[in-house]
Image (cartoon, rainbow, N blue to C red):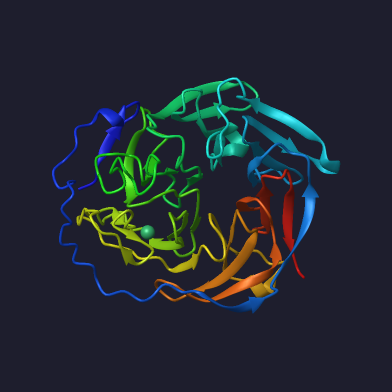
């Protein structure tokens, strides 16, 4: 059964459901292939800076139909377009409504698939009270439609990414509500939007209804769809030891799948954390430890043409060390051939693509860079 929650639900007030106590439940974890780990080095791409001086950018991408500029989110609350010659134009300014913290601010942007015609964008931010907001804006007119409010119990783990799926629905990644080891027990609570990938149809006549698409997430800062394979790739930021790359096949007729947190960090069972067994348990496709980084920035499967060596490989990195990796999706599920790339991008916050599928990256130091052949 899929869960429907109307917008503006103040989810912190929902009563706890049965099965969320301290007693570990039998989880019937299926045997699973070990997550892939770094198996060597590579120099499949290099990075070239295309803009600098932005204010803590959290997103870079291109608008459908826009051939010569990139759009950037600045964490304190501006949506800007960087055009030819580096000229910056402010398109929306929410600085008066946004709070900025380590994990708070203007965090996510999605263009409507028909943006070239309707000029609609979707933004995700942390409001002045520290709670989550999503709204639709029509550029030029400034018209706004509120789509989601979620009460946030802590400052950290707010998720971030917004994206349209291959099914035309708007998806949002939300963290577990914060603290350490999910103290509010949200991620395995199927009746709560925190610790989930959620989606809504924003094109209907009625108010959008958000549904849980995946659960058991800690802090899915960045995710992306590989529409060719109907997969979603999620970088789930780890607790004390393990950063996860998750690859999940989207199957609308299946119950939401379970990414494990906080019953599992990586593939390790954490004591005393119960598991909602309603959905198939999905273990990470790849992991790295805190010897190599401390906060994963999930990326994209490269479908561009400029860098043939990267064709079909998933590119991701780490915010803390600037390390970048690429890996090969295995047929069906999982991954192998994890390569540490020679290129590094300190303070990496976002990996996106331009209209041709070429790599774009944003960094909190103010840089926007492009992936090129080495
Ligand atoms: Ca997990």
**Residue 287 placement (x, y as % from top left):** 47, 67
From the viewer's side, name the closer residue of 227 and 173: 173
Quadrant containing ligand 1: bottom left
What residue do we see at 46% from left, 35% from top? 155
In which quadrant will I find the C terminus?
Answer: bottom right
**Residue 72 placement (x, y as % from top left):** 67, 40
| Relative to 9, 1 lies left or right | left
Identify the residue at the far right of this view: 85
| Relative to 129, 310 lies left or right | right
Q: Quadrant of residue 8?
A: top left
Identify the residue at the far left of this view: 18
What residue do we see at 26% from left, 61% from top? 280
Number of numbered markers: 0
**Residue 259 placement (x, y as % from top left):** 34, 57
**Residue 335 placement (x, y as % from top left):** 46, 73
Q: Looking at the image, can residue 355 be seen?
A: no
| Relative to 167, 111 lies left or right | right
Q: Quadrant of residue 307?
A: bottom right
From the viewer's side, name the closer residue of 306 and 238: 238
| Relative to 238, 373 lies left or right | right
């Amino acid at each position: 059964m899929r869960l429907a929650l109307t917008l503006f639900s103040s989810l912190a007030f929902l009563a706890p459901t049965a099965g969320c106590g301290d007693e570990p439940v039998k989880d019937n974890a299926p045997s699973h292939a070990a997550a892939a780990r770094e198996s060597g080095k590579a120099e499949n791409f290099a990075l070239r800076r295309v803009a600098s001086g932005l204010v803590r950018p959290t997103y870079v991408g291109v608008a459908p139909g826009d051939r010569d500029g990139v759009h950037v989110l600045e964490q304190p609350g501006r949506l800007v377009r960087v055009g030819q010659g580096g000229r910056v134009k402010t398109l929306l300014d929410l600085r008066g409504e946004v709070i900025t913290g380590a994990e708070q601010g203007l965090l996510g942007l999605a263009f409507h698939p028909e943006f070239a015609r309707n000029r609609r964008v979707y933004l995700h931010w942390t409001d002045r009270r520290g709670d989550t907001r999503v709204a639709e804006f029509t550029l030029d007119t400034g018209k706004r439609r509120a789509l989601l409010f979620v009460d946030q119990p802590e400052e950290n783990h707010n998720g971030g990414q917004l994206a349209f799926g291959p099914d035309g629905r708007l998806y949002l990644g939300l963290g577990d509500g914060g603290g350490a080891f999910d103290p509010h027990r949200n991620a395995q609570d199927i009746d709560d939007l925190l610790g989930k990938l959620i989606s809504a149809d924003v094109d209907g006549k009625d108010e959008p209804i958000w549904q849980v698409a995946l659960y058991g997430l800690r802090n899915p800062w960045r995710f992306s769809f590989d529409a060719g394979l109907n997969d979603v790739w999620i970088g789930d930021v780890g607790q004390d030891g393990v950063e996860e790359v998750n690859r999940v096949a989207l199957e609308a007729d299946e119950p939401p799948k379970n990414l494990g947190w906080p019953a599992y960090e990586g593939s390790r069972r954490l004591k005393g954390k119960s598991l909602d067994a309603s959905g198939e348990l999905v273990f990470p496709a790849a992991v790295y430890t805190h010897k190599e980084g401390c906060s994963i920035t999930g990326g994209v499967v490269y479908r561009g043409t400029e860098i043939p060596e990267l064709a079909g490989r998933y590119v991701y990195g780490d915010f803390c060390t600037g390390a970048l990796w690429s890996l090969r999706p295995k047929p069906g599920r999982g991954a192998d051939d994890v390569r540490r790339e020679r290129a590094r991008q300190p303070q990496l916050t976002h990996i996106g693509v331009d209209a041709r599928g070429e790599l774009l990256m944003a960094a909190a130091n103010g840089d926007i860079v492009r992936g090129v052949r080495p």
